[in-house]
Amino acid sequence: MAVARYIKDEKDQILDVILESGIHVKPSYSPKDLEGMGFSYEKDVADPGEYPYTRGIHPLGYRSRAWTTRQYTGFGTPQETNERFKLMISHGQTGLNVAFDLPTQMGYDSDDPMSEGEVGRVGMAVDSLRDFEIAFKDIRLDKIGSGLTINAVASIMLAMYQAVAEKYGYDPKIISATPQNDILKEMIGRGAWIFPVEPAVKLIGDTIEYSMTVMPRANPVSVCGYHIRESGATPAQEIACAILIADAYIDNVLARGYDVDDFVGRFSFNLNVFGNMWEQIAKFRAARKLWARNLKEKYKVKKPQNLFLRGLFGGGGYGLTKVQPENNIMRGAYYALVAALSGAQTTALCSYDEAYTIPTPHSALLSLRTLQILMDEMGLRDTVDPLAGSYFIETLTKEMEQKIEEEMEKIERFGGIIKAVSEGYIQRLVARQAYEVEKGLESGELLKVGVNIYKEGGESMDVELHEYNWESAEKQIADLQRVKRERSGKDVLRTLKDLESATRDGKNVMPYLVECCRAYATVGEMAGIFREVFGEFNEPSLF
Amino acid sequence: MGTQKKIKVLIAKPGLDGHDRGAKVVSLALKDAGMEVIYSGLHRTIDQIVNIAIQEDVDVIGLSIMTGAHIPITQRLFQKIREKGIGNKTVFVGGVIPSRDIPKLKEMGVSGVFPGGTPLAETIKFLQSTMLKR
């Protein structure tokens, strides 16, 4: 929530501004600052669409194509989710972003005792292919891409997406699924992990390897700095972790003997927008540059289009407040502006009521309209990277680049990202920082409107709450039981047995998962095999 | 608290949700305030939480719940607490808790409810004064 630390004198004059990543902001900037840093337009920035892509990955930016809007949607039964999808599409949304309930994310069926009270609560419940058939009914899977916000069992969901597309007559080669599929960040923040680090990363490698030939338009991994930031990382740490995590997935696939140019172009990123706006804009510009340089110099990537940092920049949940919730509508508009000024390919906003509830159709629509107003009314499509050349922004972009590199070095010195996550180094670091932020808010050192300043009026409001529907949950369980009765038990047993052998033999599990899905094996059955073979992640201690 | 025994607190994340920023921040704050804190880690069942509470002989159990399932989860906790005969534990709840649900939680036996945005000092003071009264 923190923006920056302000050092003031007794007359409220600002003496110093210290951004979260540790950069000091000066009262003004001039060409001398750029000279002092050895700034070169060609080397540091270059034209949009030119290496190192600081200004953007496309020469025409939003002129050629406005951003994709992808509000996070899904709750209750697949039927309810399907209706909400269609509503958002009818309002002009251009991609889907599927929310799954926690049992699905954690690999449990709706009738599992672990799932009680959670079926369909924070997302759509998925037990078998039957649920995907309902959820994606009448959605043009050749035209609309789907983000699948799931990680530990992303391989299962990607397999199921292929199975449903085929069922509806689409060639897997033309469908576009973007499973989130970033397990290392789940272990740092968000917490929907199941398996230990090594097999969990191997599963991600499987999805990348499989997509290359079967679903070439899929984006098999969306590397999320977003949740690491939500957990307490600074913007520089967010990008440092994201790049190192992406490298870990690249290394897994390279070890299978592939050429990096065969797959890395399909990686995408999910990054956060809350915080000091200048720092975020500089962060996104520096991130594009560092990612391109990382791929070119470390991995010897050859094709220019494989160097692009394509991303969903959005959300900003931690920036929103529970008090005076309508203020979050304005915050969302500013976050969207930051995302647009930073050249986001895809965006989504947290809705203003999310500190209370799953967004209502009304608040989700407000978020979508906020994004549309920027593109179609405010001139954000006019020209690419409009802040380029600002003495301040260019200086800050270079400073952010250095900070991100410093954070990457710290993790490398610890022994690399896999070790840092396995042993809880990053988890403890971000938790400690999150605590420092809370203390700063309580002491008033960090300012937050409605929280510690301008607290009068509208302390809280009646927000329309999304009611948990016990009947939906019961219906979901009844449907699951019907699927289990109607499916061929023989096919299920056979495909699950094949999956188990493949898993034990260390083969790529994807083709086996697709066979299981086609036989209507359940998420719990497939994940159960992984649980048995892989075991579970041992969460490192907080203290 | 003077020479009194340290307050021993279990901060627990019941259920499948993994959003633990709040639980971790509260754990660190209570530790800084001089309490002995055990953090359960993620994805704990109520049985596991109650077992840790018994094994570690904690004074306080704090549940962090963000999914909206706070009513059924808290109900289950108290059921288990009664079964195991450890009704002497103080229970508090934090997370995404709409204000209309606070009376329901208190009726069940929750001593304090601290929705997201509650100052840390408030939670600390609450625990200190509750334990002093005992």
Image (cartoon, coloured by chain):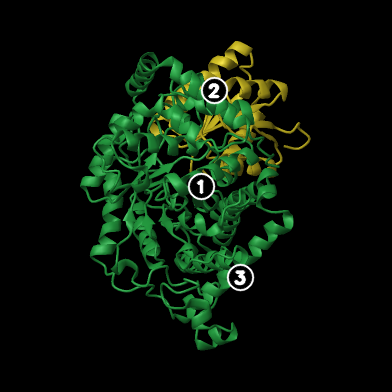
Chain colours: A green, B yellow
Q: Position of residue A28 (x, y in %)?
A: 49, 82
Amino acid type, label 2:
Lys
Q: CA distance from mark 3 to mark 2?
A: 51 Å
Q: Residues within 10 Å of mark 2 (few under 14, many from 20)?
A: some
Q: Earlier in the sequence, mark 3 or mark 2?
A: 3
Residue B46 is drawn in which quadrant? top right
Cα distance, mark 1 to mark 2? 23 Å
Give me the disc on residue A497: 2
Q: Which residue is mark 1?
A: A208
Q: Residue at x 57, y 32 (%)?
A: B13
Give how far apart the Cα atoms at labels 3 and 1 are.
31 Å
* Amino acid marked by disc 3: Gln
From the viewer's perspective, is residue B89 above or below residue A220?
above
Percent of width and height locating residue A352:
35, 48
Q: Are marks 3 and 2 in contact (CB under 8 Å)?
A: no
| Contact between labelled residues 2 and 1, with CB atoms less than 8 Å apart | no
Residue type at mark 1?
Ile
The secondary element bearing badge 1 is classed as helix
> Picture quarter containing residue B47?
top right
Give the class, few, some or many, for how many residues have Cα within 10 Å of label 1's Cα (few <14, many ≥20): many
Same chain shared by disc 1 and disc 2: yes
Residue A530 coordinates in the image, percent (x, y):
57, 29
Q: Which residue is mark 3?
A: A402
Frontmost of labels 3 and 1 is 1
